[in-house]
Amino acid sequence: MRRSKQVQSEEKINLTPMLDVVFIMLIFFIVTATFVKEIGLDVNQPEDDKPKVQDPNKRAIVVQITSRDRIFIAARDVDVASVRANIERLHAEDPEAPVIINPHPDSTADVFVQVWDAAKLVGVPRVQLASRN
């Protein structure tokens, strides 16, 4: 008996068509990317990049709210009911001074809203929220 030898044929994968497809896709993406119009807003940049210098005689009315909802105005502990009277007194001394509310991140929104409303009821032209960095 004779044994038959199995012929092993070495077949190779032809990568040429795959490379052709990749190059065609690359050309397609390059060509289409050049025609994409970017949409944006025109921004008018300020002429001066320097911050405005505040007059040292003008002071802001700073209201601090702690994490336990305690209110401090001019380094004095103030009750929620007397916030309006204190802001009114300080606003009478300097009518152009803005009220800056500086709440702690753990304070409740209820106290913040009460302080904001008190400042608006006094008639302060600018009430601002201090941001923490």
Image: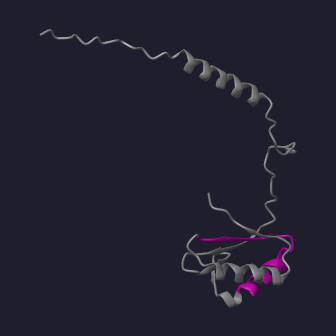
Which residue shows up at 79% across the image and 45% down it? 50
What is the x, y in percent for residue 28? 71, 26
- Above-or-below relation of 75 to 38: below
> Who's the residue at 82% across and 84% down the image?
121
Q: Quadrant of the C terminus?
A: bottom right
Outermost residue, bottom side: 81
40 or 5, which is in the foreground?
5
Quadrant housing the N terminus: top left
In percent of width and height, residue 30 lies at 71, 25
Is residue 130 shown in magenta?
A: no
Give the camera-side residue of 12 and 94: 12
In this rendered view, identify the residue nearer to me: 65 or 90. 65
Name above or below for residue 56 compared with residue 22: below
Give the magenta range.
Answer: 83-104
| Residue nearest the observer in this picture, 9 or 39 | 9
Q: Residue furthest front?
A: 1
Q: Is residue 107 found left or right of 84 in the rendered image?
A: left
Way the structure is coloured: one colour
Numbered disc total: 0
- Residue visible at 75% across and 85% down? 84
Image coords of residue 78 (percent x, y): 64, 84
Residue at 49% across / 15% down in the picture? 14
**Is 94 inside the magenta-drawn segment?**
yes
Occupied quadrant, residue 16? top right
